[in-house]
Amino acid sequence: MPVNLDTYLGVHSQALKLRSQRTEVLAANLANADTPNYQARDIDFKSALAAASSGKSSGVNLATSNARHIGPAGINGTSAPELKYRTPLAPSLDGNTVDTQLEQAAFAENSVRYQATLTFLSSKFRGLMTAITGQ
């Protein structure tokens, strides 16, 4: 009996991709903490995961006029979730909206959730290997 791996893993493989993309966005925010007029961005994880699990893409759909054009893609060719601007709690004089402490806290939380998703997927694969080998 064939097993559909996507069904077996559920939403967790998509969550791992989104967490990875969010890590990149938060790291870019931290890297540009001193850049004048830089606008902090973030991914609305809940809506991005809902869109990814339903198969719908959020945001703007771009068309290419040539097959060799690069489409809007995120990590590993997956569609990029819609980035949203973060509203600053205390705007700076140079127009930068990055709050370093807020970004570090979001980065740490995202890292913990990424690791939890990896742990869950690892246990799913371990259970699948146990079922295949019978040990």
Image: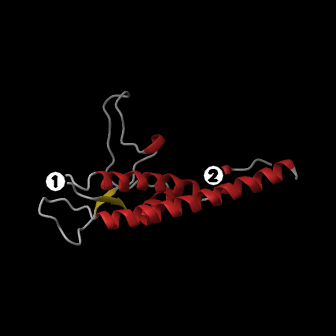
Quarter residue 82 falls in: bottom left
Q: Which residue is mark 1?
A: 36
* Residue 94 seen from this side: yes
Q: Position of residue 122 (x, y in %)?
A: 67, 55
User: What is the crowding at mark 2: few (fewer than 14 residues within 10 Å), some, or many (at least 20)?
Assistant: few
Q: Residue at x 82, y 53 (%)?
A: 131
Q: Which residue is mark 2?
A: 6
Amino acid type, residue under disc 1 in the picture: Pro
Closest to the observer: 28 or 76? 28
The relative height of residue 2 versus residue 106 in the rendered view (above or below) is: above
Q: What kind of colouring is applied to the model shown?
A: secondary structure
**Disc on the earlier residue, 1 or 2:** 2
Relative placement, left or right, of 10 versus 45 is right
Q: Residue at x 32, y 43 (%)?
A: 62
Q: Residue at x 36, y 56 (%)?
A: 26
Closest to the observer: 130 or 10? 130
